[in-house]
Image: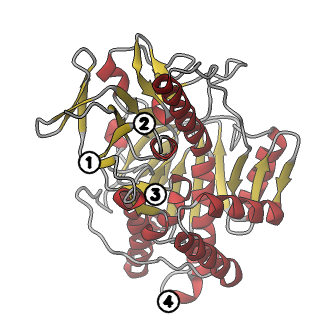
Amino acid sequence: MDTLHHVVVIGGGFGGLQLVKDLKGLPVRITLVDRRNHHLFQPLLYQVATTLLATSEIAWPIRRLFRDRTEVTTLLAEVEGVDTAARTVALSGGDTIPYDTLVLATGATHAYFGNDQWAPFAPGLKTLEDATTIRRRMLLAFEQAEREADPAVRDALLTFTIIGAGPTGVELAGIIAELAHATLPPEFRNIDTRKTRVVLVEAGARVLSGFAEPLSDYAYKALEKLGVEVHLGKPVTKCSAAGVMIGEAFIPSRTIVWAAGVQASPAAKWLGVPADRAGRVIVEKDLSAPGFPQVFVIGDTASVLNDDGKPIPGIAPAAKQQGAYVAKVLRARLRQTPAPGSFRYRHQGSLATIGRRSAIIDFGRIQLTGALAWWIWGIAHIYFLIGTRSRFAVAWSWLWIYLSGQHTARLITQKESVEPPFSGQPDP
């Protein structure tokens, strides 16, 4: 009978992969479970949605990543629950996996703030499927506008609305505006894509509210320079196939993207432990679940507070740091050495792009904007990609786009299981 300590990791995102990587050399066997067979570099997902990168450039098969780690077993499965008394994980199909230590790194999905009926009309951006769906709808809107005789319908097709002005929303808006206003005009005969409206809606007072105010102001002006219409201080009150309602004003828009909020996985419900408003598990100082020292929760699934009482942001560096920390805790437990101190997040800076040649960077005392910030942003992201081939491919794609303005991944390649109609009028 196998007596090795069994670590079960649910989720192959940044936190889960970092944990498995850092457990190398310990006398454990590891089972890594994910409902998809690939690890996704989410910070660049918007570039797949906006035709800058191909899916293969930001995703890698999980099995390939650990093919030389014989102690790691990878399972493609959906988790349905956790039995903390029996120490088992329930998978779809009725299978269960016993664990000695369980790490939940199950991420988050879109949150529509009680308006889940908006989802078919305003997809979020968390998976490759989301990205290719948004890309497909965006490109089809231009194609349908080219054939549309009704000016009102054509204008609605050429209006793209992004809800939420965090990094994802700002980055999407900037790239779509550049695509429409600079790349596509020579390719269409019946429409002028330079007349495309890109509308960015934010219920708060400013874009990129997580950045310092001067950087936020710079981003706002950069978006306006790209031709993006920014609406601040009014929430979206309705989404439909025909468009969006911003406060009391209706904007006909056939392509809508949701970038306004996230909801954690149901990990807190599986464990029966307290959660915050977004459903994240309120973890202990060592990232364990309250009352369950053998269960850890990391990444977007965990609610972790800094020393100043502010929540740690749901970004890749935070998840990686948490995965590395839990590996240290497990190493100490297995070797019966003193445990590391409480988890402390080390903020390495905030970055966001506005178009293909401008960005903002906040390193605390050092703040950068413009082209220099864009180059630093690009180098940082290339560094975190997995494998030399991916780094080369992405660097080449970015260089080509930077010099030529031509996007390299403008293919319509999939059909949707649920597709909102491109017709209809707003409800009265």
Image position, residue 90 (x, y; %)? 20, 31
> Which residue, given by chain and number where applicable, does mark 3 sit on?
253
Mark pair 2, 3: CA separation: 36 Å
CB within 8 Å, label 2 to label 3 = no
Instruction: Count neighbours of disc 4 (C-alpha within 10 A) and say few if under 14, some if 14 to 19, many if 20 or more.
Output: few
Instruction: Count neighbours of disc 3 (C-alpha within 10 A) and say few if under 14, some if 14 to 19, many if 20 or more.
Output: many
Mark pair 1, 3: CA separation: 41 Å
Furthest residue in direction right, as rendered = 365
> What residue do we see at 40% from left, 47% from top?
12
Tag nearer the camera, 1 or 3: 1
Mark pair 1, 2: CA separation: 15 Å
Mark pair 2, 4: CA separation: 49 Å
Q: Amino acid at mark 1?
A: Leu
> Which residue, given by chain and number where applicable, does mark 4 sit on?
189
> Which residue, given by chain and number where applicable, does mark 2 sit on?
105
Q: Earlier in the sequence, mark 1 or mark 3?
A: 1
Residue 347, above or below 147? above
Q: Amino acid at mark 2?
A: Ala
